[in-house]
Image: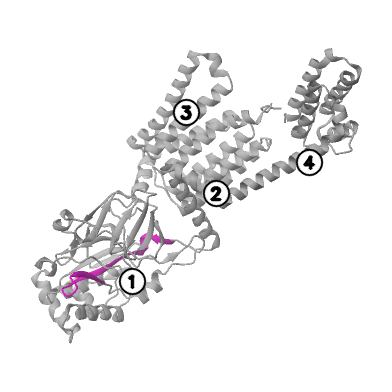
Amino acid sequence: MSQAPVSRGARLVELLPLLGAMTLHSLAHERWLMCVPVAVLLVAAVMLGKQPGYSPRLLLVSAVVGGAAGALLTSIWPVPGPMPPLVLGPLCGALVGMSALCTLCGRQHYAIIYALLLSALSVAIRGSTGVYVGMAILVVCMLAVSFARGRMGQAGPAGLVGFGVFAAAVLGISFGLWSFVRASEGVLTNAIFRLMQDAPRPGGLALQSEITLERRGRMPDTERLLMEVRGDRPQMLRTMVLDVFDGVRWKTSRALEQTRLQLAPPQKAEILRSTEITLLQSLKPYLPAPAGARAVDGASFQVLGGWMLRGDGKEGATLTVRHEGHEQLPQEPSPNAALAALPEELRAELRPLALELTRGATTPRARAEALERWFRDNYQYSLSVDLNGEGSPLAVLIRERRPAWCVYFASAMAALLRSVDVPARMAGGFVPQEENPFSGALLVRERDAHAWVEVYLEDEGRFVAFDPTPWQSRDALLSPQPRGGVGSALQAVASFLRRWTTQVLSSPLETLVRLAQAPITWVLALLVVGWRLRARVRRQRALRPREAMRGTDPRLAAIYARYLRAVKHGAGLIPGPAETDEELLLRLRTARGDEPADMAHAFIKLYRQVRFGGAMSDIDSLVALATDLDRKLRAR
């Protein structure tokens, strides 16, 4: 039979290593959605005096539940690492579950082992400032436990040195594990890193500065979640502009990359829309924003030619973009002849087709609208393309009306316009479509990447967007599938916790002020105060008939109150208003057996002798009996 700590304070101190390890794990993997509820439940269980019995079966159950939670979070919010996420997520989840159970059951040595294994995985996977902060928190937590138990203080300087060696060894093993994995040439480690390198990453046509048109190919259809959009819903989020085309490859010109522009500041009387974009993956150096952006908060950035935003949009960052309602680009001087450049063979091939398709259109806008309408009415959207045939890929696409995806439609339309000397370029980004019904946020995935055409209209003095993609067939193929209530709810909760923790870490004082001003905080505070007052009234009513037993001597009153607290907290028994000591002893014997009941009987017998017989010399023995009874009742 293990001896439980006497006080809740001691048990709370023993939680520190696990809390530190989960903090480190959350900072490394952003697993706040799993670690925060576990930490809250542990603290609540300790405060309520709960300490379940340990068993191997219970440990297995905790590992399975933790592993399942880790797998579920990985499916919603994967984090890259030196092993596949579907292995890493359940493994870390199982370690969280096992360390939490061992801590709650008083198996401190096992709990620390599992917590250190979790910390080693967390340190080895991602090195950043947050991880180093988490490592420092873990070391401080373990140091606090050592001092709280008295062992470090008894050991003196030697204990401090020993703990320093221990901490250095733990961190050394963690970094050594990472170095070993990176340096090993074994079959297993090679397979792990191959899987890691092949894992899907944020990319696609929306995050490229160069796109090649293949005759045959297939566009990856990945559902990796990249960002959440709140506030005013934008039509498109621009990330890149491609203005150089050699017939098969689009790229961003050096002139656009080296140009630096300034966003026009908002005017006082101007009504702007506000869109909040939370980056769930790092898109650096791309910053998505609607056309017509006037101000961006949340990241440092530069405005390149083509009104592209480049900056340090880190994972977890939240951008607030204020933009025009029409989402149109600012006015700018007429572009040079490069925006109408085409290889001569391609121009000769496409110009007759362009003249035929824009017959009757006399202005650049009319020609762009005619081509946009023709592509939308005569093509089918497809994730695969086959443009083998006579002539260039774009000529085959236009003549034979073969299915393709947005990049090919935008390329074909821009090339046709250039063939009749209309300045045109291709732009790319994302089109938000999927909405979470619980959070109301738009979810932007990799499959939402899109490309369109921007045409310079001389009469407006700006580039105007045209989209030739046949959206009816695209929606039929790529429209968001219902995620189900459970998946949507979990995603909404994960989003809330992620945003909340990011806000706490970035501006803790502002978070505390908002929390103090929130009505729910005051409601909860009032409920807690009311609950405590009710418990106090009930306790006073229960103890009122025993005032005679307490006597007038304050020492005896304190000892008797201590006896009643021991019975309440150790056995869960509260004496009734008219219940005698003998009746309470009978209930104690039924609940906890003969040994605690005999100790309580001995206390009552001696207490009556001291209280009514005047044997005050036995008061120390009475204190010892109350202490022993308290310890016995708290033992499991």
Query: SS at mark 3?
Result: helix
**Is the residue under label 3 in contact with that under label 4 (CB below 8 Å)?**
no
Query: SS at mark 1?
Result: loop
Locate residue 400: give its quadrant.
bottom left
Residue 124 versus residue 325 in the image, above or below: above
- Residue 35 visible in the displayed image: yes
Locate residue 263: give its quadrant.
bottom left
For marks 1 and 3, give the CA distance: 55 Å
Q: Residue at x 60, y 32 (%)?
A: 12
Marks 4 and 3, the one that precedes in the sequence: 3
Q: Name the amino acid, label 2.
A: Ala
Q: Which residue bears the numbered disc 1?
A: 382
Number of dots carrying numbers: 4
Q: Name the amino acid, label 4.
A: Arg
Q: Residue at x 39, y 47 (%)?
A: 80
Marks 3 and 2, the one that precedes in the sequence: 2
Marks 4 and 1, the one that precedes in the sequence: 1
Q: Which residue bears the numbered disc 3?
A: 139
Marks 1 and 2, the one that precedes in the sequence: 2
Residue 554 placement (x, y as % from top left): 79, 22
**Is the residue under label 4 in contact with that under label 2 (CB below 8 Å)?**
no
Residue 417 versus residue 445 in the image, above or below: below
> Which residues are drawn in magenta?
442-465
Query: SS at mark 2?
Result: helix
For marks 1 and 2, give the CA distance: 36 Å
For marks 2 and 4, give the CA distance: 42 Å
Q: Residues within 10 Å of mark 4 (few under 14, many from 20)?
A: some
Q: Name the amino acid, label 1.
A: Ser
